[in-house]
Amino acid sequence: MNVFRLAMQLALCTLLALATDACAQAPRTAPAPRAVWTWEGSSYAMLESPSAADEALAFLQRKRVNVVYLYADAFERRNLIEQQPQLYRAFIRRAHARGIHVYALLGSWYLSTERYVLPRHQRKAVAMLQRVLDYNAAAAPAERFDGVNYDIEPHLLDEWEDATRPRLLHGFLDMTAAMIEARRKSGQTLEIGPAMPFWWDGIALEWRGVRKPVSEHVADLTDYVALMDYRNRAEGSDSILSHAQDEMDYAERIGKRVVIGLEFNPGEPAKLSFHGMSEAAFEREAGKVEAAYGERRAFDGFVFHHYLGYRRFVGESLPAPD
């Protein structure tokens, strides 16, 4: 009898192990998440017009976009997150009701926020994040941002060149560390990540006594990165997959996430953007990326640049204003 019980236990354990292994190897059934960068004018229009918000959210649902990076700073001498936070509360409630997450998008051409990597401007970066933290602290759960994406690009500065690059990248890392410290002090767990060029993995930099690629310093500091991986083919050399590989490998090792950023606006050279290609061609390339990375914990889908450009790309321009 004891031998029989032992045999049964061994058989059950074997079946359980096989089932567990099969589950672990099962392919991803849900499509990869899709996000979209939504800049100043588009964001403010959605905030100030309920009908524009509803139309935009319906469009995003049709296109399986389930995360909006919504601009959350000053524009045209107004700062709605401070002056009219109820507009953000209403929009985020609407989005959440449709199953769409909302991240606060920080950084702006309008505000020349590339300067925030400079020590004399760093406090402005912390202040813009603090406004989001203060907003979330005062909002009801259904009205809170789900995360933060900041787009501050030191290579846009006029002074960016080989000799100044290490100093400016140090400034980016110092700024990022200060923002993460502000979140820690707030007691909130809001996830924070930057827009980051794919080529930062080719720049080694010593920061706080450790020398490694800039991309790895950034991943160490933040919760995820939105990788500006602007190419229009998935495979081969100089492709989406080839440029994302180092970031994906490192994120996998340290338990972080990578969102693959793709471009839809006109640009030169043509390889930077899906502009001029068909939507079906884009979906084929995106499918190849999903097939390659779908089993990787670090892969967190795509983010499209940007809302208006993506709408034009799929042939659904904005409707006429009310």
Image: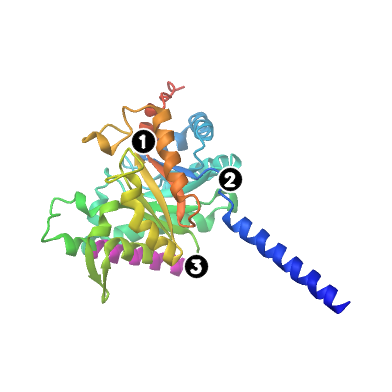
- The extreme left residue here reads 163
Gap between marks 3 and 1 measured at Cα: 31 Å
| Quadrant where the image shows the N terminus | bottom right
Q: Is residue 307 above or below residue 113?
A: above
In this figure, which residue is indicated by the disc labeled 3? 187
Task: Name the residue at 44% across, 48% down.
Answer: 292
Q: Residues within 10 Å of mark 2 (few under 14, many from 20)?
A: few
Q: Tell me the magenta residue range.
A: 170-186
The amino acid at mark 3 is Gly
Q: Is residue 182 magenta?
A: yes
Front residue (pair 109, 233): 233
Compared across the picture, whether 7 is left or right of 145 comes to: right
- Is disc 3 in contact with disc 1, using a CB cutoff of under 8 Å? no
* Tag 1 secondary structure: helix
Q: Residues within 10 Å of mark 1 (few under 14, many from 20)?
A: few
Q: Is residue 158 left or right of residue 248?
A: left
Mark 2 residue type: Thr
Vertical position of residue 137 compared to residue 45: above or below: below
Kind of residue at badge 1: Gly
Q: Which residue is mark 2?
A: 29
For mark 3, give the secondary structure.
Answer: loop
Discs 1/2, front = 2
Q: Secondary structure at mark 2?
A: loop
Distance between mark 1 and mark 2 Cα atoms: 36 Å
Of all residues shown, which one is farthest toward the bottom? 2
Tell me the CA gap for discs 3 and 2: 35 Å
Instruction: State the residue position of label 1.
Output: 41
Q: Mark 3 or mark 1, which has the lower sequence index? A: 1
